[in-house]
Image: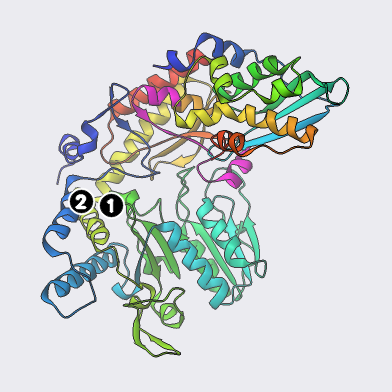
Amino acid sequence: MNDELYRENILDHYKKPHHRGKMARASCSGHAINPFCGDDITFYLKMKGKKGAEKVDAALFEGHACAICTASASMLTDEVKGKGTEKARAIGKERVLELLGVSPGPTRLKCALLPLKAFKLALYSHLGKRMDGKEETELAEASE
Amino acid sequence: MAFDIEKIRADFPILARRVNGKPLAYLDNAATTQKPRAVLDAMQEYYEQSNANAHRGGNALAEEATEIYENARKKVARFIGASPTEIVFTRNATEALNFAARFCAEQMGAKRILLTEMEHHSNIVNWQLAAKGKSKIEYVKMRSASAICKEDVVGLSADSVFSFTHASNVLGTVNDAALLCRLAQKTGAFSVVDGAQSVPHMKVNVHGMGCDFFAFSAHKMLGPTGVGVLYIRNELADTLTPMFGGGGAIESVALSSTSFARAPHKFEPGTQDVAGAVGLTAAIDYLENVGVSAIEKHVAALHGTCIDGLKEVGGVSVYGNGRKTGIVSFNVGKLHAHDVAQFASDDGVMLRAGHHCCQPLMKSLRVSATARASFYLYNTEEEVGRLLASVKRAKKVLS
């Protein structure tokens, strides 16, 4: 039943998403598209602190997305706030599913991971780095 | 023959299964249809009794396989009002449309390619690839979710090709293909028609339509996956050089050159999917036995119930008019189509949600996705009722 996927916490974040909107002076942004359905999420980050010891000061997201994707994006904005770049980088698929509290099927997994991909793209564009192979494979589930 | 829904349903083994603990209500027929036992049996029987390499070898079994394959071609030809020599078997409608695009751009001098915003990606990407930046691609704009208006078809000339869908896989809307082909013909332009969504639902006559190419897939009309058809008008087929070469498509081969067989064989190199063609034959037999117009009537009734029911739910937008094709594309208020389809799926009701491989059309409709129910001969009023119940539940939980 839906009660498994559309749990209270997911519905709460879907109906009242945290940190939704466009960031005027973002340090960086990342945009990810789910080619399966055309959904798209843009993640904006404001970074603070000295180079080498930066932290995520604020995160916003916007885009077209379903309940699972919207909830995932909303939870992720909470999750990354205040984290240093290394800790933020370490957030992976497992953590996102833990936050959602569900294990969606293969189709909806793409919905759940799309915000993570947008977030990582934003962070890496700021760091001027590329994803490693393992991470790319994991996030490829969000877009293949 | 009377339209006996219970009897029809009993012919489709998959309809007996359950999904998520609920009886399967398969409402994704515009994506692919289920297969009746007659189709499965015919293919099995071919492999068990007649399998050999058609058009090869002088043995009795190969002759039998050849006859079966060519009879399939004849049946397909009769079904769409063509001559057997005009029927080329492909892997699917997409492959057929890719062939048509390349023939037009590479061999028929099509410098201008006119498409419509209603097209499936399979009738857009093929042209972009074939054009190679040398031919110009233009689009007939959509005014609304209605059929293509002839007034909007402009700019055709002798160096153009007009390619359009007979029926939209999103809107269900049916275009007046004969009228549109005549427009092309008048200017000397070629016409290519995507019939993937029309052939399963209505009587099609390609000669009456006057198209140069026509494409469709077996799997959307009770047949197997892996078989499609490209109709190429006879006079044209003779002038075209095959894009792929190999055995069976030749008259004679020397070390430096080849003389090709006549159409359609020159377009079918290599061992063909005879079992697939047999499956398509059985599918046509099945559809004709039930009656194409009886199916049309049944599907229109389900479509009507669905539209009325969605109106009652309230706040539902329906896109297009799929009365003839049994397609209902819709959105429920601000709910995302994915979520609606997920609720339905959990109730055992299979819908499609997303852009339906029609991103330009979605853009013109100003939506990112729609949910789509598509009906066929084995669907029931009860299944429509279950769909509506799922939609109501999604609305209640998510709003």
Q: Which residue is mark 1?
A: B223
Residue furthest out toward the right = A50
Residue at left 38%, top 78%? B234
Q: Tell me which amino acid carries mark 1.
A: Gly
Q: Is residue B46 magenta?
A: no
Q: Amino acid at mark 2?
A: Val
Which of the labelled discs sits on residue B39, or is there none? 2
Point out the stretch of residues depicted in magenta.
Answer: B342-366
- Residue B330 position, x and y percent, is 49, 32
* Rendered location of residue B291, percent (x, y): 22, 50
The number of discs equals 2
Could you tell which of marks 1 and 2 lies nearer the N-terminus?
A: 2
Packing grade of label 1 (10 A; few <14, some 14-19, many >=20) is: many
Q: Quadrant of the N terminus of chain A?
A: top left
What x and y, as percent, mark residue B317?
53, 29
Asked if marks 1 and 2 touch (Cβ < 8 Å), the reply is: yes
Q: Is residue B65 above or below residue B24?
A: below
Q: Secondary structure at mark 1?
A: loop
Query: Front-most of B317 and B37?
Result: B37
- A32 up-or-down from B129: above or below: above
Q: Can residue A66 be seen by looking at this rendering?
A: no
Mark number, residue B116: none
**Element on which disc 2 rests:** helix
Q: Is residue B383 left or right of residue B131?
A: left
Q: Is residue A50 visible?
A: yes
Marks 1 and 2, Cα distance to the nearest angstrom? 7 Å
Residue sitting at 31 percent across and 30 percent down?
A: B25
Check residue B344 for magenta coloring: yes
Task: Tell me what residue is drawn at x 60 percent, y 76 percent.
Answer: B158
Where's residue B344, x and y in %?
40, 25
Closer to us: B114 or B125: B125
